[in-house]
Amino acid sequence: MLRFENVDLHYGSFRALSGVSLRAAPGELVVLLGANGAGKTSIFMAASGINKPSAGSIRFGDRELIGQRPAQIVESGLVHCPEGRKLFPMMSVRKNLTLGAYVHRRDKAGIQRSIDEVFGLFPILEKKQDHPAGSLSGGQQQMVAIGRALLGRPKLLLLDEPSLGLAPLIVKQVFEVIQRINQAGTTVLLAEQNAYSALAIAHRAYVIERGHITLEGDRESLLNNEAVRAAYIG
Amino acid sequence: MRLIEGKAGWALLAALALAFPLVAPNNYLISVATLAFIMAIAALGLNLITGYTGQFNLAHGAFMAIGAYTVGILTVDHQVPFWIAFALAGVVTGVLGYFIGLLSLRLRGHYFSIFTLCVSYILFLLIEKWESLTHGPVGIMGIPAPSGMGPLRFDTPLAQYYLVLAFLALGIWVMARIVRSLLGRSFMAVRNSDDLAEALGIDLMRTKTLSFVLSVIYAGFAGALYAGQVRFLGPDLASEAVTFDLIMFVLVGGVGTLLGPLVGTFLVTWLTQSLQFLQDYRMVVFGPLLVALIIFLPDGIVGTWLKRRARRADAVQADTRSHVAVTEAKSNA
Amino acid sequence: MELFFQQLLNGLTIGGVYSLVALGLTLVYGILHVPNFAHGAFYMSGAFAGYYLMAKLGLNYWLAMAGAAVVVAVISMLAQRLVFHPLRNAPELHDMIAAIGILLFLEAGAQALFGADFHRMPTPYGQVVEIFGLTAPLQRLLIIAGAFGLMVLLHLFLNHTVIGSTIIAMAQNRDGAALVGIDASRVTLLVFAISGALAAIAAVLYAPINLVYPAMGNLVITKAFVIIILGGMGSFPGAIVGGLIIGMAESFGGFYVSTDYKDIIAFVLLVVILSFRPQGLFTMKGAR
Amino acid sequence: MLEIDQLTKQFFGLTAVDAVTTRFERGQVSAIIGPNGAGKTTFFNLVAGTHKPTSGRITFKGQDVTGMRPDHVARLGIARTFQTTHLFDNASVLDNLIVGHRLRTRSGLWDVLANSKRLQEEERLCREKAREALDFVGASHIANRIAADISQEERKRVAFALALATDPELLLLDEPAGGVNPEETVGLAALIRKLVDHGKTVCLIEHKMDMIMRLADKIVVLNNGAKIAEGTPAEIRRDPHVIEAYLGTDHVAV
Amino acid sequence: QDTVKIGFTGPLSGGAALYGKNVVNGIEMAIKEINAAGLEVGGKKVKLELVALDDKYSPADAAINARRLAQQHQAPVVFVPHSGGIYAMQAFNEQEKFIVMAYSSTPKITETGNKLTIRIPPTFNSYIEPFTRYEMKKFGKKVGMLPGDHEYAKNWTQLFGPAWEKAGGTIASNNPMSYNRSADFYSGVSRVLAEKPDVLFVGGPSEPTALVVKQARELGFKGGFLIMDQAKLDEMAKVTDGLGPLEGSIGVLPVSYDERVGPKTFAAAYRKAYGADKDPTTESSYNYAMTHAVAAAMKLAGTTTDASAIRAKMGEAIGKLPKETNAGEFKGVDAVGGTVVDPLVATVEGGKIRPVNLSDLMK
Ligand SMILES: Nc1ncnc2c1ncn2[C@@H]1O[C@H](COP(=O)(O)OP(=O)(O)OP(=O)(O)O)[C@@H](O)[C@H]1O
Ligand SMILES: Nc1ncnc2c1ncn2[C@@H]1O[C@H](COP(=O)(O)OP(=O)(O)OP(=O)(O)O)[C@@H](O)[C@H]1O
Ligand SMILES: [Mg+2]
Ligand SMILES: [Mg+2]
């Protein structure tokens, strides 16, 4: 479904990704593990078209994503829930969610249904639906961000550190939600620091270090990998 | 090593400036240069508050007018000797700057900028309307040239050139001291992040006000020199066009660099003088030229040069520490 | 009493024009976070375009207004593409100076094309009408109706259409907007087009009771800046209320205090208001 | 050392911090935990002077600091780090740190113009302090890098160093290990311990429970702005309110 | 063949550009004619060439431009149409040896004792009394003052107010307005009209002045207008849609209505050069005539470089100017360097502009 082949990405003269190749098959939940600054976010930014790779190819289905605008990429069903949330702070929570469905804007009834589903997942948002998103706390905003991504009806959902700054209780819920989304048929690519919880729901995972993929495997093999345990699970 | 290089550079500039009148074919070029030096003094001040402290002041030109008018009013209406009036010009702009600073520096970002734009407009209107003090739109004429000091006399273009040059040199020296000291570091801390600066115990208001007052004193002295050089003052000196010119100088040269305002002032002045032949089409050419400069040399001339040098230095270092990647220095004024 | 209402009417007229210009400025500010100093030149271009279409091509007033709106929308979009777009990652100081470059260019360009003379735009609505015992030039009533009608339309557009909310979304978070599939460059262009068109319409509404000349934008733009910081930068209601406040202050101040000081009144008002509400009248969160 | 009495903060009707009363003891690590939006960051902002409280009192070393400006508070010896790590991004790490000690120096404009002894002395002192703080957090090797270019974990360390350079007695750390991987979290926890061992008092906000439970002497739990529990890690872990509001039932076993 | 540069510095861009352009047009026309006719000075053929520099109305830029003109181009005369620039140049023109051809009727510029200054337009003192008499006789003794707030208007107002009162009139209110900057005159006009004046004193650039007149009529004003000499009746009529609203006004005679030989010839030539729809202004005609005078003075003095010698012959040159080129009907130069003119004024009566002799009004 998603295929990176030898992707390089530069910020100025600094090479953040070098020769990254990875794939996610339909229905899979794939986790990216890596320390801070390893390049996880960069992979996502490349996929969703915010940053342009300098070499390689990114295919989504049979479509080449490099060179496409973010808007086109979202339309094709790849939705990115970014690190740092990037909400519309002065707009109400509901409006934020609605805009998540911008590419499906003609389907009013569908949007309403999806919003209700998101409220089902995060009841607090229903209570806060008329508050400006910026007035919510960090964790609540993260929920809005995930909700907004879901409204884009992703075939492939990119989740960048969704548990960052969330209370343990909420983190647990978030992982449950991710698993549920995945089980309902959405392919998920998840970047996480919280390696244990992430691996617990993953099918496969990649380990990325300093812009290189250094390890790849299914859940079991990684959970049992000594190096991984030492570095990311502790 | 770098220090010597810097010193040598400054010495070279000084030598050039000292020798310029000897090679200049006529007084016209000398008076262009004199006026450019005066503007450069004001631009240095603007660079302190905008480039180093991050507060984008749009009233700078008006403060220059305040300095000029102080000299004009005192010398013409009250027969105060030029140099006393000159010193008072600094005092008056400083005091006025202090109060305006207190009022405006509570605002942040664009609010501050546009507020100061309005302050500038109010000052302009005051100069234009307060006829009993400023002579209103009629202007002040007959301002004396700077009076002689001991054996020195300042009534020829050449003497004025060296006089203004001396003040410019003094201005640069003081500025260099400031920005390289702990004080300068406080200014830059405020520019880089005021929240953080405050959390580190830097008194925002005090620091910003100090920088503001210092910067407008530069403008005040520049204005005072202007009065002695042009010898006539009209309210237009306080119009925002002067401020925009100053901003342009700073930006073209390189904001937040010591040399930038100087280079920018000389280059833009030279450009406007050379484009004179275009007459009324001048701005049709100058406008796009300015835009192009901004787009293709965003750090200004000096900024770009410094950055290139920094990158080269970094590249040399990167060889020695292979595992550490170096991103290009981000500039964010 | 009659005099009072005359001033009120006058305040509404200039206030309406100011608000329209300020709205365009505020919209662009919201997207670019840059005070567009070239906006006054857009206003001026609108007046010249309208003048040219009417006086030289003989179009009727309304067609000329539409034509001017299109012309300035195009100029505005070109400015975005050629100048602001390349500068999108640069510090804001740069956009400001670049905007001044555009302003110099447009002003000199207008002078090269039309000369430095004052021009006069004809209007089919030159009559003076009486309503409720008050005499009012028809064109002034037209300005009021036009300006406020346009504001209502714009409000409906921004808050009740999807395209409108994409503009608001862009203003609040560019990356966020891109990630939900909003095409940033299209929205930016659209905002510039709207902003330019608003300036042009304001100019064509106002020009018949005024003069058309290359430096005409400078008068309005300073006021527009006062208005948008008075109302809160990027705030839509702020621009309207701010425009009315300044319009009324000028009208009543000019009448009851002194025309000599009426400009100062507006600016002093600003200083006073900002001393109490540093973030302007209509912004809730910290002024940033 | 720090006493909080009935501290309340409202934003446009929303009560972000609700009549919190507590105290933090010298030489201890105190932690504040609570769900997102509980008001933890706001609580820090009140102590550090970034926001003015609606009501209540804050006393630091017996002195009333309620409503004081942030720079005053800092000078009294309270340093803080921010939730999203703030640094002066376009300066080198060392330059970042040199300003850190500025608040303990006195030289002003005259010293600068006269190049006074005091100024030279103080500039040397600031540089020394910066090096010292950098050494302390173990980040000397990145002294000359541009702050924007260093890794998240390095940023956290530099932020500590920056706070340290102000010579504080109390450090307020907002999510010091947020966005840092488990291995590095352990390193940061050790660093916090080291701070306390060197006589500093620490108060931190964190969601990483393992770290908190190991590190803290005392935990305060906020929910909806109000304090719902306070005590040692062992007490908190068992507290039914806390489990319900925050930890969830799973965590009891940790 | 020598080329002699004639200097000009003035606003060629920005708000006052039109004004500057008008001056340049006049000078340019004269230079073309002089070159076509051929000029011989001291037995040598010389060609004149205009060097016009933009100073955006700024005194400092004007001073720099003047230095450039004097030193780089060796211009013996520099035309400058604004008092700020004039004052700034007077600080050094005697040292640098060039004549300031000052287009500004501010009396002060010739009161400073500068030996190389020629003031081109007459001072406005001569207008005030006849204007006052005419309007007072026709409409009444109460004047409402609505002049501009720029330098020139200030100077006028200062002299006009006392003169009106001396003639037995009263001043209802004095309300200067920014003609150049204001976007709207409504409140100012209604404020003055609230005092029910018989006559309105107005004046600034023609077009805004016309807007003030129009506004006053719209607000029901029925009296006459006393118009400062800066505004020209013909240009105003274009804005007020005809002379109707201007009925009962008195102002200076527009060049295009001047039936004397000089102005008439000039107006025809001007239209030929710059377009049939362009009405010449005194800015153009006065500077045109003075350019001819400069050429004549050079010829008389036998030098193109010695400014003092040229200056000394200016009076004679003006006196000898052929009628066709003396578009300003100049008679000579007085002791301080101001021109001597007998200007014509005009009234609007019965929807027509009628030339009147100043001396007739004084009877
Ligand atoms: N805009 C940028 N400009 C320059 N360098 C950048 C930029 N964004 C990221 N980098 C650098 O690229 C590298 C990879 O960053 P990236 O954000 O992809 O890492 P990450 O694995 O997502 O880290 P984290 O866990 O902190 O989110 C880092 O060294 C980072 O400093
Ligand atoms: N400046 C502000 N204006 C208005 N409301 C605010 C402001 N700052 C915080 N709040 C509100 O106060 C409440 C507490 O927020 P706070 O940031 O203190 O939570 P927190 O406990 O730090 O959460 P997190 O763990 O997510 O960072 C939230 O509901 C938030 O929306
Ligand atoms: Mg990341
Ligand atoms: Mg928080």
Image: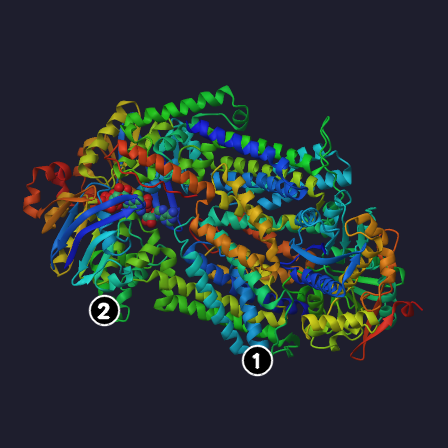
Residue identified by numbered label 1: C58
Chain under label 2? A
Name the amino acid, label 1.
Answer: Gly
What number is the disc on residue B16? none
Q: Quadrant of the N terminus of chain D?
A: top left
- Near mark 2 (Cα within 10 A), the count class, few <14, some 14-19 or many ≥20, is some
Q: Is residue B42 left or right of residue D161?
A: right
Question: Can you give x and y, in whole percent of width and height, for residue A116 in the image?
Answer: 23, 63
Q: Secondary structure at mark 2?
A: helix
Chain under label 1? C
User: Between B177 and D252, which is closer to the camera in this rendering?
Assistant: B177
Q: Nearer the viewer, mark 1 or mark 2?
A: 1
Question: Can you give x and y, in whole percent of width and height, for residue B151 in the image?
Answer: 73, 26
Residue at 83%, 74% (x, y): give it.
Answer: E259
Question: Can you give x and y, in whole percent of width and height, for residue C155 in the image?
Answer: 43, 67
Q: Is residue A139 left or right of residue B61?
A: left
From the viewer's perspective, is residue B331 above or below residue A65? above
Q: Is residue D43 visible?
A: yes
Q: Secondary structure at mark 1?
A: loop
Q: Quadrant of the C terminus of chain D?
A: top left
Residue at 63%, 59% (x, y): give it.
Answer: E15
Name the amino acid, label 2.
Answer: Gly
User: Between C53 and E296, which is closer to the camera in this rendering?
Assistant: E296
Residue identified by numbered label 2: A110
